[in-house]
Structure formats: C-alpha cells, structure tokens
Amino acid sequence: MLSRPGGRWLRPLSVLPLGARDPPLVRASAGGVQRSAPPVWAAAASVSAGPGSWYEALAASAPVQGTEQVLLGVHSATGLPWWACIALTTAALRGAVTLPLAAYQHYILAKVENLQPEIKSIARHLNQEVAVRANQLRWSKRVARLTYLKNMRRLVSELYVRDNCHPFKATVLVWIQFPMWIFMSVALRNFSTGATHSEGFSVQEQLAADGILWFPDLTALDSTWILPISVGIINLLIVEIFALQKIGMSRFQTYVTYFVRTVSLLMIPVAATVPSSIVLYWLCSSLLGLSQNLLLRSPRFRRLCRIPLTKSDSDTPYKDLLAAFYTKFISRK
C-alpha cells in the first residue's frame, strides 16, 4: 500500500497485464449584405483562389459577420472614429474574455505546480513497489517500466480529478483567443475591401478617412512599416517575458520559445501586406496582451483572482523581471 502525505491511503498497486487496456483517463448570415469584388492588393494578399474557396467561406461565415456587427454597433453607439473604435473594441474583448480566461489558466497552472511535490512522492514510492514486484515476478525491465508508467498515469489522473485541475483546462484560453483573433482580422479585411456597407455608406470609405497620425487611411498599407515593426517588437517582448520567468526550461519548451520568436519576426512582413486597420488591431491586441501578462504577475491581482500561492511566486516580480532582463541582455559578456 502507498500512502499520501497526511495519512490518506492510495489504492493498492494494480498489476496490469501487458495486453490489457489502460485505465480511462479524465479528459477533460446576415442577409442583404452586398459583397463587392476586393481590390487587387487584397486578392494578392489572400490565398483564396475564387468565390468557392475556404477563405470566401470564412469571410461570409456567421462568426465573422457577428464580429462585423459588433464593430458596427460600437462605432454607431460611440460615434468614435474607426481607429478609436478598433482600439476600444479590442480592449473590451480583452478585458471581458481573454483576461478572465488568462486568470483561470494561471489558477489551473498554480494548482498543478502545487501538486508536484505530492506527485514526486508518489512516483518514488511507486517506483519502489514496482521494483519489488518485478523482482518477485521476474519481470523484464520493459515490463516493469510499462507497469510503472501505466499506474503512474492513473495515480496522477486521480490527483487531477481530486483537485479539479487537469492541465488541459489551461489551454481553454488558446481555443478562445485564437479564433477571436481570426474573426476580428477577417472582419476588418471585409471592411477594408469594401465588402460591408452600413446604413447606405461604404465602411471602406469611412475607414479611408478615419485613421490617425501617419496612417490616415486604414484601408491602405503602412508604407512606413512602423505598425508592422511595432507588432513584431511587442510580440517578442511577450515571448521574452515568458522565457525570463522560466529558469530551467526543458528542451521542448526551448524549441517552442524559438518557434514563437520566429513567428513574431515573420509577423512583420505579413503585417506589411495587410490594411492598416488589421495591423492596428494586431498592435492593440499585442499591447493589451503584454499588459495582461504583466498584470498577472502582480501578487495583489493574483490574490484578487484567488490564484493559489506557489513556491515560484515572488513578492517583487517586476524587480525580478528587470534584474533577469539586465542579466540576460545587458550585463552578459
């Protein structure tokens, strides 16, 4: 019998035959819209090949049309110019949708982190018991290893069920945020190509006159590349903040970090080929994402969200971040 810290007993180790199945794991159209042909630059930037392509289906889908109605509703209700309307809608979606989901993600990950000492203790005791059984029953190393892995998977799954913190729940942010990003981008492309009209006026014409600073025309490309480069820099900052808070990254985490860095850099030439309205949305979203990541490092905000305290938490997260940044990028010889 194995015991958990606190005196509670686990179920006896079940020796699973190699041919047996593993124990189950917890697993967690808007009518009347006239569509005109997009301009040449939009057709060149899109990978769609005709009216029956997947992109045309996405552009006319219910989620994209719903997003268009949200943008039009915000513009009509506030009377703001389109550049401010895009920024305001992005902030509202971030605050109402992604920030709560990000807080929930940190809540789940904190609970998983706090389970690690108990998981290590169970692994140590289970390894000893499997070694005893292997010696008694003359198992090969392969049989002993498979038996250990199957039972360890079951026991860890029981811990996740007990504390209601399966790691898959931490991925819900990605499954919501990425589609939302796609729908907003496609909706703004529809606006910028003249595919959507509101109250008899072309939204494309409104966007062309509702820019600001060096991008007065939101349907045009940013010839200065200021917006595209800003998007790439902000996304790189988000990646570096994540990397700095991970002291001992695994090989897989290192590969993922390099991959995301590459994607952040590739976003610069991509952003230079789409209308400024879309790049403005990407920039606002990235800036709010950076602010959200910094906010979720605040001990006071984490307590407000009832995120469990972990050993890796710090009372001075921002000072630690600056110190790590200085050590990695400035004082490095």
Image (cartoon, rainbow, N blue to C red):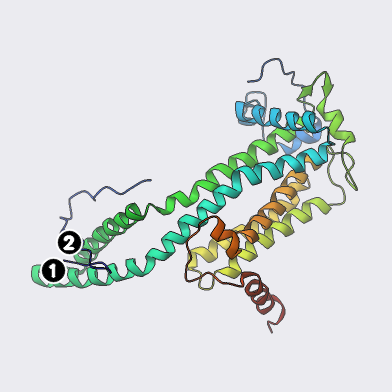
Mark 1, residue position? 133
The answer to which quarter of the image holds residue 72 is top right
Q: Residue furthest bottom?
A: 333
Q: Is residue 266 above or below residue 241?
A: above
Residue 248's disc number: none
Q: Residue furthest left?
A: 136
Q: Position of residue 143 (x, y in %)?
A: 19, 63
Q: Residue drawn at (62%, 43%), measured in percent from left and top? A: 96
Q: Position of residue 48 (x, y in %)?
A: 67, 32
Q: Residue drawn at (18%, 55%), measured in percent from left and top? A: 18
The answer to which quarter of the image holds residue 331 is bottom right
Few, some or many residues within 10 Å of mark 1 (<14, 14–19, 20+):
some
Tell me if label 2 and label 1 are in contact, CB under 8 Å: yes
Mark 2, residue position? 13
Helix, strand or loop under label 2:
loop
Q: Nearer the viewer, mark 2 or mark 1?
A: 2
Front in this rendered view, residue 144 or 318: 318
**Which of the two labelled residues, at mark 2 and mark 1, occupies the earlier sequence position?**
2
Q: Residue drawn at (83%, 32%), measured in percent from left and top? A: 79
Q: Residue drawn at (71%, 15%), measured in percent from left and top? A: 32
Q: Is residue 228 visible?
A: yes
Few, some or many residues within 10 Å of mark 2 (<14, 14–19, 20+):
some
Kind of residue at badge 1: Arg
The answer to which quarter of the image holds residue 315 is bottom right
